[in-house]
């Protein structure tokens, strides 16, 4: 079911998205060698609650796994998504760390992610982050009223391939708003002109996950990593499809 949101719903989704966008900005000042992902998670939970929201990932259920234990997904280096925050995961100089966060406020959701450099990172790591960020903006540019989901997927996937990298298999973006994950799925590779048609009033979470060495992923419980151990980056925004350029809702 693809929901078109009313003006009133969009106001609420925008408010939830603002919490997420502001939080991701604040986290950039905290990310440095020596901090644990648990400390980041602790800060994130307080910030969301102080903003009148609730963490959207905490307690999230996937059949066969224990409920998600934190506010943030914290995914270092070759972890693609869904890493657990932990006191044992201490960031070190040269790491990259993907942070994905969702908030719910007044019954509506916002969802976004960023990958951060910890101190000074390799040229390879910063190029990967730059390519992933650009892949996201290409996907957002393709999200216009009248286009199709495949146009977003193609914009993201063809750019990643051109740059010599790989979109992680089976991990996709999604509709967002009334629920954390709504239809349509938004794959990070695909064909122009295929898939559901986009309409003004849709709210979508677009999220390229880009690996250096291979598209293949390995799953361990919640955690998805790159099969060959190479680096992976992840950027995500929740956006509103309009009659003109999409509005980025999770930009602080
Ligand atoms: Mg998402």
Image (cartoon, grey):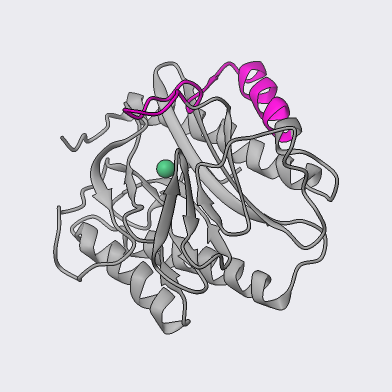
Say whether residue 205 is magenta.
no
Residue in the picture at 62% in, 17% down: 49
Q: Is residue 3 left or right of residue 101?
A: left
Residue 165, position as x, y percentages in the image: 46, 76
- Which quadrant does the C terminus fall into? top right
Residue in the picture at 84% in, 50% down: 33
Q: Is residue 19 left or right of residue 6?
A: right
Q: Is residue 123 left or right of residue 159?
A: right
Residue 97, position as x, y percentages in the image: 65, 52
Residue situated in front as seen by the camera: 14 or 235: 235
Residue 93, position as x, y percentages in the image: 82, 59
Residue situated in front as seen by the camera: 57 or 52: 57
Residue in the picture at 54% in, 64% down: 133
Q: Give the answer, above or below, for where 51 lies relative to 231.
A: above
- Which quadrant does the N terminus fall into? top left
Total numbered badges shown on the rendered structure: 0
Where ligand 1 lies, by image quadrant? top left
**Residue 37 sits in which quadrant?**
top right
Residue reaching furthest to the right: 34
Say whether residue 42 is magenta.
yes
Q: Is residue 74 left or right of residue 63?
A: right
Q: Give the answer, above or below, for where 17 lies relative to 185.
A: above
Residue 154, position as x, y percentages in the image: 28, 70
Residue in the picture at 34% in, 26% down: 9
| Magenta range | 40-67
């Amino acid at each position: 079911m693809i929901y078109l949101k009313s003006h009133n719903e969009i106001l609420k989704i925008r408010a939830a998205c603002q919490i997420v966008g502001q939080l991701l900005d604040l986290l950039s000042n905290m990310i440095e060698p020596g901090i644990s992902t648990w400390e980041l998670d602790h800060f994130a939970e307080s910030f969301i609650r102080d903003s009148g929201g609730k963490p959207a990932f905490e307690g999230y259920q996937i059949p066969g796994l224990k409920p998600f234990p934190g506010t943030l997904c914290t995914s270092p280096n070759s972890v693609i998504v869904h890493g657990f925050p932990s006191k044992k995961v201490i960031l070190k100089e040269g790491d990259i760390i993907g942070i994905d966060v969702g908030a719910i406020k007044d019954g509506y959701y916002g969802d976004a992610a960023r990958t951060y450099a910890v101190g000074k990172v390799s040229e390879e790591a910063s190029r990967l982050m730059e390519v992933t960020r650009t892949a996201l903006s290409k996907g957002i540019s393709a999200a216009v009223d009248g286009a199709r989901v495949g146009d977003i997927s193609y914009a993201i996937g063809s750019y990643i391939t051109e740059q010599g990298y790989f979109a992680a298999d089976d991990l996709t973006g999604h509709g967002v708003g009334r629920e954390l994950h709504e239809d349509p799925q938004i794959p990070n590779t695909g064909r122009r002109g295929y898939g559901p048609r986009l309409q003004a009033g849709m709210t979508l979470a677009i999220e390229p996950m880009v690996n250096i060495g291979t598209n293949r992923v390995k799953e361990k419980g919640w955690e998805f990593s790159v099969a060959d151990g190479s680096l992976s980056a992840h950027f995500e925004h929740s956006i509103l499809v309009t009659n003109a350029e999409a509005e980025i809702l999770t930009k602080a």
